[in-house]
Every structure is written in C-alpha cells, then in structure tokens.
Image: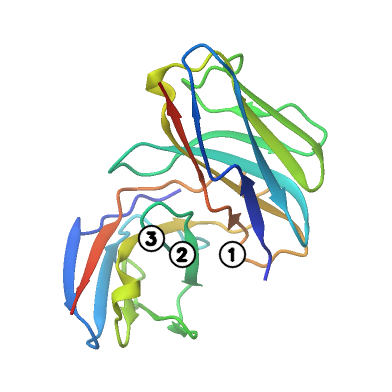
Amino acid sequence: GAVVSQHPSWVICKSGTSVKIECRSLDFQATTMFWYRQFPKQSLMLMATSNEGSKATYEQGVEKDKFLINHASLTLSTLTVTSAHPEDSSFYICSATGAGTTVYEQYFGPGTRLTVT
Amino acid sequence: DAKTTQPPSMDCAEGRAANLPCNHSTISGNEYVYWYRQIHSQGPQYIIHGLKNNETNEMASLIITEDRKSSTLILPHATLRDTAVYYCIVRVPNAGNNRKLIWGLGTSLAVNP
C-alpha cells in the first residue's frame, strides 16, 4: 500500500525559532497533500491543502505567514512553523493523495509531535 | 459534506465483537461512508468504506442501513491493539481537487482484557 512518512517524529524547540516538518510519499506521486494539527483530546483540524507546484490553500483562521507550506515535488511537502510559540505545541499530521491511489484516497503520515518551550 | 454523530466512548471485552454506531441522517445519495481509526499518538488509519451495500475486509465489516441514515462498524474479535479513536466520515470520493475530510470527535474505543 501507499506509504507516507514524516520527519522528524518529534521535535522540541525554543520559543521564537522556526521548525520544519517534512512529509514524503514513498511509493506514489502525491499530487495533493494535506496538513492537519491535533491538540490533546481533540480531533484533527485541517490547516491547509497543497497541490504540487501551486500555492497552498489555507483554512480559515490559519496564518499562512506563520505556517509556511511548500510542495515543490510530487513526493515531498514541508511545513515550516515560523517564530514558534508554546501555543503552537501540537501533533502535526500530513496526508497525501495522488495518481494511483485508491478510492479511499488519503494516506496519512505517522505525525510529528512539536513541543515549543 | 454531511455531519456524523458518534457516541464519545465505548468499552469492549477482548475477543468480543465491537459494534461502533454512526448516525448520518443528512447523507446525500452520492456520499460514501468512510471509517478511520487513530491509535494514540499515531496518524489515522483507513479501515473501510461503503456506499449502500455492506462491506467486509480483513479489518472490519461495515453495515449500512437501507435508508443509509446510519451505519455500524464491526470489529469481529476485538484485541487490545484495537483500542483507538474511531472516526466515521461521509463524503463524496474524488470530489474534484477538494478532497477535505471533515473530522468529528469520533468514538474512543477501549478494549479491556
């Protein structure tokens, strides 16, 4: 089956610094990738949708200048949290879909736990 | 996409069947029912999906009522590793470039030894 990886699996950073999270599709071409955020005991909240080679579409309330998304290739999307603050601490999950994927469409990465101190 | 309603939590004894209900009374004729689960601190995992016929795969069975307003996910022999949050989502597959999944709070299933 289609596999999506994320790196790193967890990261701790200091307030004010930037953190980059990678999402890779390992065995298929991901024409579309989604980035989610999940706070403890809450559901997944979609942050943005990115199509390869295009600018990401952000959900209402998500700051595009704070959460920079790049989807420059069919196998890699990155999410950069700029000037991170403790309230950005969360579980970040990506998913991908694309050519050759089946009708259930989205394959999820294992998630990245971000802690901002 | 239609809204779904699920009980917040359920318990099940190990080895017994776990039956997880989902109400989707406003489902449209072209919307499918999808089930995902999320084990603690992991990404979601696809389980099964269906339109109107009952479906079965190696993980679970999906029973959809004739009026399609509700469905039940059945884990026939629950194990401790099935402890997770289970999400029921209804949507139109391959809906153009917008393939957003709308996530509710799901059902937290605890499988007890």
Chain of the residue on which disc 1 is drawn: A
As helix, strand or loop, the secondary structure at mark 3 comes to loop
Instruction: Please identify the quadrant where the C terminus of chain B is shown.
Output: bottom left
Q: Which mark is residue B39?
A: 3
Q: Position of residue B109 (x, y in %)?
A: 24, 66
- Location of mark 2 (residue): B34
Q: Position of residue B67 (x, y in %)?
A: 33, 72
Which residue: 29% across, 75% down? Answer: B80
Which residue: 44% across, 46% down? Answer: B102
Q: Which mark is residue B95?
A: none
In the picture shown, does residue A26 fall above or below A8?
below
Task: Using the rendered image, report if marks 1 and 3 lie on a common chain.
Answer: no
Counting other residues with Cα less than 10 Å from the Cα at mark 1, is it few (<14), some (14-19), or many (20 or more)?
some
Amino acid type, label 1: Tyr
Chain of the residue on which disc 2 is drawn: B
**Mark 3 and mark 1 in contact (Cβ < 8 Å)?**
no
Q: Can residue B72 be seen from the camera position used here?
A: no
Amino acid type, label 2: Tyr
Q: CA gap, disc 1 to disc 3?
A: 19 Å
Q: Which mark is residue A104?
A: 1
Which label lies toward us, 1 or 3? 3
Chain of the residue on which disc 3 is drawn: B
Q: Position of residue B82 (x, y in %)?
A: 34, 73
Q: CA gap, disc 2 to disc 1?
A: 8 Å
Q: CA gap, disc 2 to disc 3?
A: 17 Å
